[in-house]
């Protein structure tokens, strides 16, 4: 439209000629017909009619100043500059014959004696050049505009095509995810059954081992209680263990002992294991409790290393020192022999204790190893491997689906107490992520979260749901949206409506706190 106006203006400038139409001074061609010399003149506002010879007589007769277009008699009059070769214009009639050239064709100073030069053609030429440049700019701008429109169309088509491809990929991955999910569940079922069978068998083995250990412990206790080794544990033998006292007086009475033995005066090993041991095992203290021995201290001679290389080397060194110092002290050879013998006995005892400690350590380690579940058999392991493979394939497919959904990109919309929805950024239909359900915050702050339910169903899946977590903020805005698990969305929503007035602590003089 702007280009059309510029072209019209150029044509008007080009068509402007020097043809002069007879009319009163200061009258435009468009108003020429109001000024007919053969008729009286009627003011343009219709307020008065005067003889035509009173037009431009330098006296204002009409209120609108229309009778003096060529003089400065009327303060509200207008003088028309023809400006042939340039643009016509109106100036206030007060400027007529004021000695200043306002019209480029000098017609406003026809009777002032001012020396004016007609510059209309030059000004017309310059304006024409400017208009031509504007026309060229408008033409080039229009061409670029069309180019941008075409590029936008191509870009839109490309994005639509990309979106269509991504949608197809999404549908393909959704189908694959569902298929792999079914395969995974089918593989996990026999895996779980096989694992349960394996665990049940192992639990039975553990139960049997535990029963055997308890039975052996009961037999060991029975042997400790059977002081006279007659194959029975009697009331008198029970009474010797004060820790089995039941009334807290520190003494096991005959009646208490009989009660512990199930009302019998004595029991054999079988009865003790089956009926008696379970009732006393928590209180019973074994007479054979041995503290874990520590390695014996090895005497170190003065002047020797405080950390001998070996026990045997230290013993050898002591023997040599005693032989060298034989006359240095008043000691009998028998005493020396006895001392040496004692040392050897002490050393032997320490070594035995150390061996027992080592044996106990390896026994405990062996017991700990026995507590571990044995490896699965080949058939069960094959089922586990198949299930692991199915799980991995399902996980990879689900990851690929998430990547495609992320590439599509969505705009999320939350209408509090109404609905949550998403829409692809590059066009497409809106998908419901749920409608208002209930407040879902914890008991301590129930109104800190909103639950939206019964949204559009996922492909071969459940209906979409959204949990909206609310927080205090200066603006009402959705901070983030994620999909922690399939078809379950989490939205972070900030709003001033959740902000509470900060309560200042009373009774404090510390303003800075």
Image (cartoon, rainbow, N blue to C red):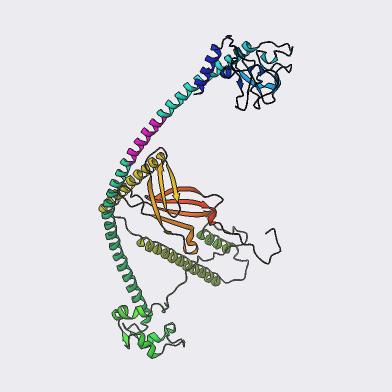
Residue 460 part of the magenta-drawn span? no
Q: Is residue 287 above or below residue 472?
A: below
Give coordinates of residue 433: x percent, y percent.
39, 50
91 left or right, relative to 3: right
Q: Nearer the viewer, residue 217 or 184?
A: 184
Residue 452 visible, this orientation = yes
Residue 222 visible, this orientation = no
In terms of image quadrants, where is residue 370?
A: bottom left
> Which quarter of the rendered picture does the C terminus lie within?
bottom right
Q: Is residue 408 above or below residue 314?
A: above
Q: Main secondary structure of the magenta part?
A: helix
Q: Which residues are magenta?
A: 155-170
Q: Residue at x 58, y 19 (%)?
A: 34
Residue 168 part of the magenta-drawn span? yes
Q: Nearer the viewer, residue 69 or 204?
A: 69
Q: Residue at x 31, y 64 (%)?
A: 203
Q: Residue at x 34, y 73 (%)?
A: 214
Q: Nearer the viewer, residue 35 or 454?
A: 35
């Amino acid at each position: 439209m702007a280009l059309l106006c510029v072209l019209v203006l150029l044509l008007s400038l080009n068509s402007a000629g020097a043809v002069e139409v007879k009319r009163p001074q200061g009258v435009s061609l468009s108003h020429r017909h109001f000024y007919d010399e053969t008729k009286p003149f009627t003011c343009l506002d219709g307020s008065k009619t005067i003889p035509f010879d009173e037009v431009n007589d330098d006296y204002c007769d009409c209120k609108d100043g229309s009778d003096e277009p060529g003089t400065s008699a009327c303060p509200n009059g207008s003088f028309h500059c023809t400006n042939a070769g340039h643009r016509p214009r109106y100036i206030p009639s007060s400027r007529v014959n004021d000695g200043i050239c306002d019209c480029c064709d000098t017609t406003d100073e026809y009777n002032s004696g001012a020396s004016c030069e007609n510059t209309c053609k030059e000004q017309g030429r310059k304006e024409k050049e400017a208009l031509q440049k504007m026309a060229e700019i408008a033409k080039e701008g229009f061409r670029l505009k069309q180019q941008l429109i075409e590029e936008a169309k191509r870009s839109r088509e490309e994005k639509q095509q990309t979106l269509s491809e991504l949608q197809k990929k999404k549908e393909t991955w959704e189908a694959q995810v569902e298929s792999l999910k079914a395969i995974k569940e089918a593989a996990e079922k026999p895996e779980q059954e096989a694992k349960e069978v394996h665990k049940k068998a192992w639990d039975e083995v553990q139960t049997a081992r535990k029963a055997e250990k308890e039975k052996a412990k009961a037999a060991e206790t029975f042997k400790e209680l059977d002081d006279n080794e007659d194959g029975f544990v009697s009331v008198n033998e029970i009474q010797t263990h004060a820790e089995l006292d039941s009334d807290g007086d520190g003494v096991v009475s005959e009646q208490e002992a009989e009660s512990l033995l199930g009302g019998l005066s004595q029991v054999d090993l079988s009865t003790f294991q089956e009926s008696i041991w379970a009732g006393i095992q928590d209180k019973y203290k074994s007479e054979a409790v041995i503290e874990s021995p520590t390695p014996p201290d090895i005497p170190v001679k003065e002047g020797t290393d405080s950390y001998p290389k070996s026990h045997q080397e230290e013993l050898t060194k002591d023997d040599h020192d005693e032989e060298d110092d034989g006359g240095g002290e008043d000691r009998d050879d028998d005493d020396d022999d006895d001392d040496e013998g004692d040392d050897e006995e002490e050393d032997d005892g320490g070594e035995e204790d150390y061996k027992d400690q080592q044996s106990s350590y390896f026994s405990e380690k062996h017991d700990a190893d026995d507590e571990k579940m044995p490896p699965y058999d080949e058939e069960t392991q094959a089922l586990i491997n198949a299930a692991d493979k199915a799980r991995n394939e399902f996980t990879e497919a689900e990851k690929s689906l998430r990547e495609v959904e992320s590439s599509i990109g969505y705009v999320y919309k939350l209408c509090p107490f109404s609905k949550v929805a998403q829409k692809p950024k590059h066009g497409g239909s809106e998908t419901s992520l749920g409608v208002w359900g209930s407040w879902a915050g914890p008991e301590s702050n129930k109104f800190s979260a909103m639950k939206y339910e019964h949204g559009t169903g996922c492909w071969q899946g459940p209906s979409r749901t959204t949990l909206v977590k609310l927080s205090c903020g200066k603006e009402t805005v959705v901070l983030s949206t994620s999909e922690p698990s399939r078809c379950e969305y989490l939205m972070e929503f900030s709003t001033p409506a959740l902000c509470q007035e900060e309560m200042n602590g009373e009774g404090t003089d510390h303003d800075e706190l």
